[in-house]
Image (cartoon, rainbow, N blue to C red):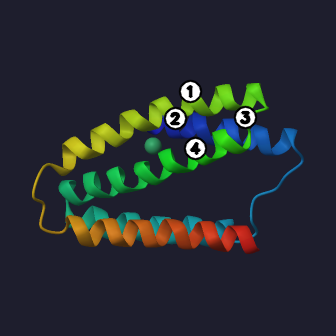
Amino acid sequence: MDFHESDHAEIFRNLLLDHQARLCFLYPLFFVGGLFYGVIVGFLGLRAIGTSTYAIENIVNDEFDIALKKLKNQDAICKKIREIQLEEQQHLEAGKQLAGDNYFLSRLVQVIARSGAYTAKYMASVL
Ligand SMILES: [Fe+2]
């Protein structure tokens, strides 16, 4: 999973360069927020990590679907996104398995994960 994420980050860094785009200037804040969130979830244990992974990967999958619709005329980018999306769907399944059934903190972890992710997306879109 770590190899996938590093590879995906490299692909998106190159796409930003190719399109002369830049990261949101709050990117370091998102990094620190994500790190803080990850540590908290880590302290809650493996089932919380699985639940969080599942929640985040669902968002990633939805966002890739949105991107594929927006970029439908750009075959090269869509091909890369579809390849990445397949790997992210593997992470989603791994998270689902790790979370298991009837985890008592599932709802809370998912609400926090979704709130954080969509807050970051909104902030990135307006800044
Ligand atoms: Fe992932």
**Disc 3 versus disc 1: distance between alpha carbons?**
15 Å
Residue type at mark 3: give it: Lys
Q: Position of residue 92 (x, y in %)?
A: 35, 42
Q: Earlier in the sequence, mark 2 or mark 4?
A: 4
Residue in the picture at 68% in, 31% down: 78
What element does badge 1 sit on? Answer: helix
Q: Is residue 51 above or below residue 80?
A: below
Residue type at mark 1: give it: Glu
Along the line of sight, which residue is nearer the eye, 32 or 80?
80
Q: In front of the other: label 3 or label 2? A: 3
Image region (quadrant) for ligand 1? top left
Q: Which mark is residue 64?
A: 4
Image quadrant in which you'd find residue 76? top right
Q: Earlier in the sequence, mark 3 or mark 1?
A: 3
Residue type at mark 2: give it: Gln
Q: Which residue is mark 1?
A: 83
Residue in the picture at 36% in, 66% down: 39
Left or right relative to 24: residue 63: left
What element does badge 3 sit on? Answer: loop
**Disc 4 versus disc 1: distance between alpha carbons?**
11 Å
Q: Which residue is mark 2?
A: 85
Residue in the picture at 79% in, 45% down: 16
Residue type at mark 4: give it: Phe
Q: Which mark is residue 34?
A: none
Q: Quadrant of the N terminus?
A: top left
* Contact flag, marks 2 and 4 (Cβ < 8 Å): yes
Q: Is residue 39 above or below residue 47?
A: below
What element does badge 2 sit on? Answer: helix
